[in-house]
């Protein structure tokens, strides 16, 4: 029952603030409203308009986190965004996978796995972060990438699936 109430609350916050402009003060207020239902949230959590967050009770956010417009965060398991994480336009973060049952994925049970994005990492536009992935500190996930494996800290990853390209240093 709590999960369904939080889905309604998330929808309410999104609907209430969707017409307001994406300026830092309003984005921080959106973040504050979402944080009321989250287990942990640091200061300066900024959420743009049109962001969809499902599973607020499983989302933990550090300080100075920014989520751009049209991002979808679907928490079937815990999702941890550490301090100074940025998630770019149209990215998708989903902490659950469908399973195969009787020749179909439609009715297979969900297989949830933790997602953790490390300090100072930047998920660029149109990226997909799959269940069970840990992204290290200071990573850049290039635009249009799909991350389905763990990423070491301090590197640039790109492609489908994302591969280590070079060091950020």
Image (tube, rainbow, N blue to C red):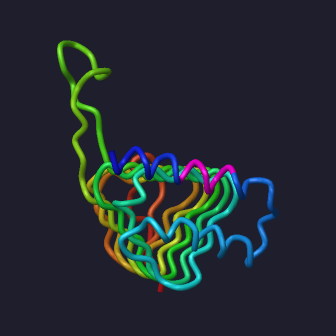
Q: Is residue 46 magenta?
A: no
Seen from this angle, which residue lies furthest top?
103
Q: Nearer the viewer, residue 52 or 36?
A: 36
Locate the N terminus by quadrant: top left
Q: Nearer the viewer, residue 12 or 138?
A: 12
Horizontally, is 161 left or right of 36 in the view? left
Q: Classify residue 152 by image quadrant.
A: bottom left
Horizontally, is 11 left or right of 162 in the view? right
Horizontally, is 12 left or right of 7 in the view? right
Seen from this angle, which residue lies furthest left?
102
**Figure label count:** 0
The dominant secondary structure in magenta is helix
Highlighted magenta segment, given as a residue range: 10-15
Q: Nearer the viewer, residue 168 or 82?
A: 82
Which residue corresponds to the image point at 30% horizontal and 60% vertical from the top-left? 78
Whether residue 101 is visible, yes or no, is: yes
Q: Classify residue 56 by image quadrant.
A: bottom left
101, above or below 15, in the image: above
The image position of residue 57, as x and y in percent, is 36, 60
Horizontally, is 146 left or right of 127 in the view? left
The image position of residue 8, as x and y in percent, is 51, 46
The image position of residue 97, as x and y in percent, is 29, 39
Which residue corresponds to the image point at 47% horizontal and 53% vertical from the top-left? 73
Which residue corresponds to the image point at 70% horizontal and 54% vertical from the top-left? 16
Whether residue 138 is visible, yes or no, is: no
Q: Classify residue 26 by image quadrant.
A: bottom right
């Amino acid at each position: 029952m709590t999960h369904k109430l939080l889905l309604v609350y998330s929808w309410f916050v999104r609907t209430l603030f969707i017409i307001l402009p994406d300026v830092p003060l309003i984005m921080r207020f959106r973040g504050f409203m979402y944080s009321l239902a989250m287990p942990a949230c640091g200061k300066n959590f900024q959420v743009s308009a049109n962001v969809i967050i499902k599973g607020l009770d499983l989302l933990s956010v550090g300080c100075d986190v920014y989520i751009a417009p049209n991002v979808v965060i679907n928490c079937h398991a815990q999702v941890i965004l550490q301090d100074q994480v940025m998630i770019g336009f149209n990215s998708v973060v989903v902490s659950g996978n469908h399973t195969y049952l009787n020749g179909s994925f439609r009715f297979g049970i969900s297989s949830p796995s933790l997602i953790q994005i490390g300090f100072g990492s930047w998920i660029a536009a149109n990226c997909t972060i799959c269940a069970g992935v840990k992204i290290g500190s200071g990573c850049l996930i290039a635009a249009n990438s799909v991350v389905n494996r763990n990423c070491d800290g301090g590197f640039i990853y790109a492609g489908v699936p994302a591969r280590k390209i070079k060091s950020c240093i």
